Amino acid sequence: MIVLSVMLLLFFIFFLIYANQITISHESADRITTERIASGIRAAINYVYLAGDGAEYNASFAYGLSDVNVSVYGGTVDAQSDVAQYSLPLLTQNVNETYVSPGNVMIRNDGGMIEISQPQ
């Protein structure tokens, strides 16, 4: 009986450790995805800015996480999920303030002002 109790206790301990590792693994993946999204949007905006007046870039961002909020304002790209928040600087502060949702995004340089729009 004691052996069975010890085995059951060890199983419970190993199960808790395993469940904790799975949670940590999923949170790490969410952090990486949030950072990847912010970096991708920042890179697209910076490319259009560096290309100069009249440059346009059509991008498609599929987040993979439904709970990532991405906004562009004040020369930064902010991406926030349940487990992570990233604020990455842009090369210019001349960007219209907007919320970027998953899907197609049109980024255009209009005389140094970066305009971000999403077709409906």
Image (cartoon, rainbow, N blue to C red):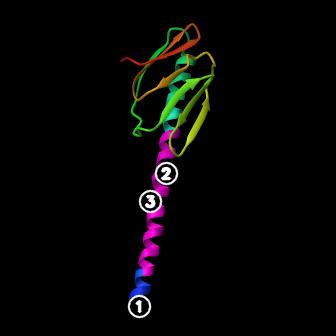
Q: Earlier in the sequence, mark 2 or mark 1?
A: 1
Could you give the CA–CA distance between mark 2 and mark 1, rounded to whole angstroms? 36 Å
Q: Where does residue 13 sit, x and y in percent of width and height?
A: 47, 74
Q: Element type at marker 3?
A: helix
What amino acid type should be assigned to the residue bearing mark 2? Answer: Glu
Q: Residues within 10 Å of mark 1 (few under 14, many from 20)?
A: few
Relative side of 114 to 22, left or right? right
**Cβ atoms at labels 3 and 1 below 8 Å apart:** no
What segment is highlighted magenta in the picture? Answer: 9-35
Q: Element type at marker 1?
A: helix
**Cβ atoms at labels 2 and 3 below 8 Å apart:** no
Q: Main secondary structure of the magenta part?
A: helix
Question: Which residue in the protein does label 3 denote?
Answer: 22
Which label belongs to residue 3?
1
Q: Is residue 58 above or below residue 70?
A: above
Q: Is residue 32 magenta?
A: yes
What amino acid type should be assigned to the residue bearing mark 3? Answer: Ile
Quarter of the figure with residue 72: top right
Q: Residue at x 38, y 92 (%)?
A: 1
Q: Nearer the viewer, mark 3 or mark 1?
A: 1
Q: Earlier in the sequence, mark 2 or mark 3?
A: 3
